[in-house]
Every structure is written in structure tokens, then in C-alpha cells.
Image (tube, grey):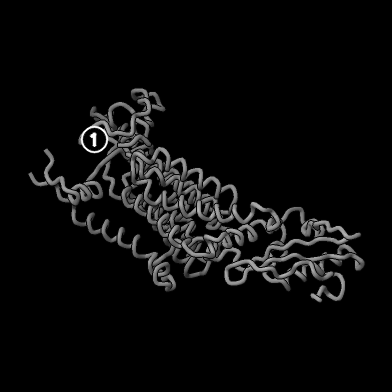
Amino acid sequence: MRGGDGLWPRLVRWALLDEGSTRTAALLRVGLVSLAWAKWAEDLALFRQSGLAAHAIGLSFFASTALFFVGAFTRVSGPWAALSMLAAYGYLGLYLGQRLAFVHHHTRILLIAVVLVALMPSGRSLSVDRYRAVARAAREGRPPPPERGPLWTLRLLALQVSLLYFFSASDKLRWSFLSGASLEQIYAFVYGGPDLAGWAGYRPLLVASALATVAIEYALAFGLWVPRWRRAIVPLGVAFHFVLYYTLPISIFSATMSLLYLAFLDPDRVHAAIDAVLGQGPPAAPVVAATPPGPEPPAEGGAAEGARHPLTPA
Amino acid sequence: MEPPRPPWPRALAFAAAASWMVLAPCRKQLFGLKNNVLTLDWAMFRNVGQNACLVHYVRREGGAERTLDRFALLGHEAPAEAPAELRVPESAEAARAIGASLCEALGPKADVRLYARCPVEGRFAVASAGEANLCADGGRPP
């Protein structure tokens, strides 16, 4: 029987003590390193930088992220990659003033995510480290180590995503944005015209787009936390970022935010879904009703028995 | 049986990180101060296109107006490949200067008019409504 089931003990347990599958961390590891390369690799290449420090940071970035990507020596390569990116941000971006490449909210969220994932035991799944651990266990005649680890940094990542949406939406609560004028300026800057002011639907479209942007961001800020809403909210968020990716020059940010939705999904259900896709577990359960099946999920063990869709409410 | 306690370094790190995530954006977004090394904001697209004017040029011939493709006339295949000052003039004067280039391309007898809306205090205001021929007298408004 669990003791201390008030709100505060449950919150502490959820934030600091819960453990779950490490496959989510592994997926984040692979995805975020891919995005880091897409964003920074060319800017850190030999031909783009000058000076010993810049070259050292570049080499460090490439070496550490390559190891981290494949999940080799992740307890070292993860923090090493995070420190390399922090060095790039601080020295190249802030100190040398290469702000366009390194200092931007697009890169900040990527950097924060990499730092948090570096603190996760992401090498316990889908990695060279995992391969070696399984091989060692087989040689020693014992079962492979469980793909489980603490979730506290995953909780922080979810909190960061939620706060990003909240602050972004709140910043847009000004007349210049809600009237559509800011969107019009962005349109002018990115596309250079044509001026559609003569079209009757132009002004209403701008206003509707502005209001929809704010509404969607607030919905994402809060709705991602509600399990029974995620089945709708996650596709909404992905669609929102797809539209931004397609229409505006914010590709890395859009992809990063969509990837980070993984932080909100139950890691054990993600684990089970991957098993189901690989044909290694029971078939995925049909869509379940919104009503939770029981008071609490199982406290022990690995992936939940019976694969359930990761977006199914808890 | 008492519930397990989280290790204090983890609790401290979590609290510190969560506090930073909440408070760091407040410096700029709540108090209007500049960011420092430790703070950041999530204010997006605040400064994009702040001064960008929306312009289009027409050629008047026989009482009718035909919209001109300023990018093609000035030798660019697509707007994305044109320099920023051609794509997004930041003032009526800059837009008239583009008009002068169009007049050079079309010849001195062309009648080119400018329609422009430029941002004024965060809102667009009409800066030119085609009242003057840009190819005559430097395109100064009457």
C-alpha cells in the first residue's frame, strides 16, 4: 500500500522518483543530434571558423555528437556533446558575436533539450551501449539489463516545452500581433509581396491566423499535460509546426518542437508501441475509451503489458 | 511505511532548473529588461519585418494599369533570390528608388506608379497610392 498519496507526495514522486522505459530518451537522443547537425554542423565545419578555440569547439562538437548519436559511451558522450554545444553558444555565439548561427530561440530550445537528454540514461536503449550490455549479459549467462531509468529530466523537458508555448503565446497578446499587422510584416519580409490588401478576405485571414496562433500555443501549453486530450493535441501541434515549417524559414525549430512532444508520452507505452511495431510484443490494443481503466498503472516491471497507443489516456 | 525520499542533489537540480525555466523569460517578457547571459526570452518574430513595406508597381498605359514584376524586370528569377532591399524596401523613399530602377529598365516614356503601405507604429499605413509617375520628375508626389 502506498503511503503519502496527497497531491504533494504524488507530485514529488512523479517529478523526481518515477522510472520508465529509456526508449523515449533514446529516440530523443537520435532526433536531437540529427537536428543539431542540421542546424550547426556547417557553421562549425573547418572552412567556416577560424582560430584555435573555434576549431577545437567544432572538433569537439563533431566527435561528441557522433558518439552520442550512435549511443556509444553515452554517460560521457552525452554531457560532452552538451558542453560542446554550450561552448559554441557561449564562445562563438555570444563572445564572438556569431549570433545568427548560434544565438537564437531556435537554437536555445535545441540546446536546452540536448542538455536535458544528456542527463538521461539514453544509452540503455537503441544504442551501441545497449548492444554491448546485452552481449555482456549473454556471455555471463544472465538476462539483459532492463531498459529503465529515472524520468526526472524528461519531466523537465516537458515543462520547458510547455513554458515555451506559454511565454510565446503571452508575448503575442498585443494589438500589433492580434490585429494581424505583425503577420503582415512577416509576410512582407519573407515573401516580398504581392500586396493582397485589395482582396476582401485578406484582413480577416490575417486576424484569424493571429488569433489561431495564440489559441493553439495556449492549447499546447496546457493541453499536452492532459492525457485524454493528447490524441487531439499532439496532431494539432505537429500540424501547426508543419504549417510553420512550410510557410516560414523556421525549419529546425518546428522539427525540434514536434520531436519534443515525446516528453509528454508515457515512456512505457512508447516502449510497448515500438515492441509492437517490431513484432516483439502483443498487438497494439484497439483505441480505448477516454475513461482510465483503473486507479493507477502498475508500479513495477518494464513496458506495460499489452501494447497501448502512446497517445491513449493513462 | 514512509514514501521514498528523492535524493537531495536531484531535488535541488530539478528545483533549480524548473525555477530557471519559469523565471528566465520574465526578465525581458515581464519586466522589459534586456537579456543577459543567464536569461532568455520566447518572444518570437518580434523584430522580423519591422520596417518592411508592402509594395507593388503598375505601368499605366492607355488608362489601364498592369502590375509589374519588379524582380523579373531587374534580372532576378524569383523574389527569394533578390536582395533584401529589393524584396522588402523599408521606406517609401526606398520604394521610389526601386521605381527609378524600373523606369531605367522600361525607358523614360514609361508611366510607372507605386502603391506602398509601410509600417507606422506597428500598423500599416498608406505611403503611396499611385498618385505620381515615378518616371517623371523623379517620381515626386504632386
Q: Residue furthest left?
A: B1
Looking at numbered disc 1 in the image, what kind of residue is underneath it? Pro
Q: Disc 1 is attached to a residue of which chain?
A: A
Of B35 and A86, the residue lying toward us: B35
Q: Report the number of numbered marks.
A: 1
SS type, badge 1: loop
Q: Which residue lies furthest to the front in this view?
A: A200
The x and y percentages for residue A147 are: 29, 36
The x and y percentages for residue B123 are: 60, 67
Please state if A33 lies on the left or on the right of A291 as rendered.
Answer: right
**A87 in relation to A95, above or below:** above
Residue at left offset 30%, top offset 33%: A291
The x and y percentages for residue A20 are: 28, 39
Of A98 and A18, the residue lying toward us: A18
Q: On the rendered image, what quadrant is the C terminus of chain A found in?
A: top left
Residue at left offset 34%, top offset 61%: B22
Residue at left offset 55%, top offset 52%: A209
Of A49 and A38, the residue lying toward us: A38
The x and y percentages for residue A111 are: 42, 56
Q: Mark 1 points at which residue?
A: A297
Please state if B66 lies on the left or on the right of A5 as rendered.
Answer: right
Please state if A13 lies on the left or on the right of A73 as rendered.
Answer: left
Asked if residue B24 shows in the view, the reply is yes
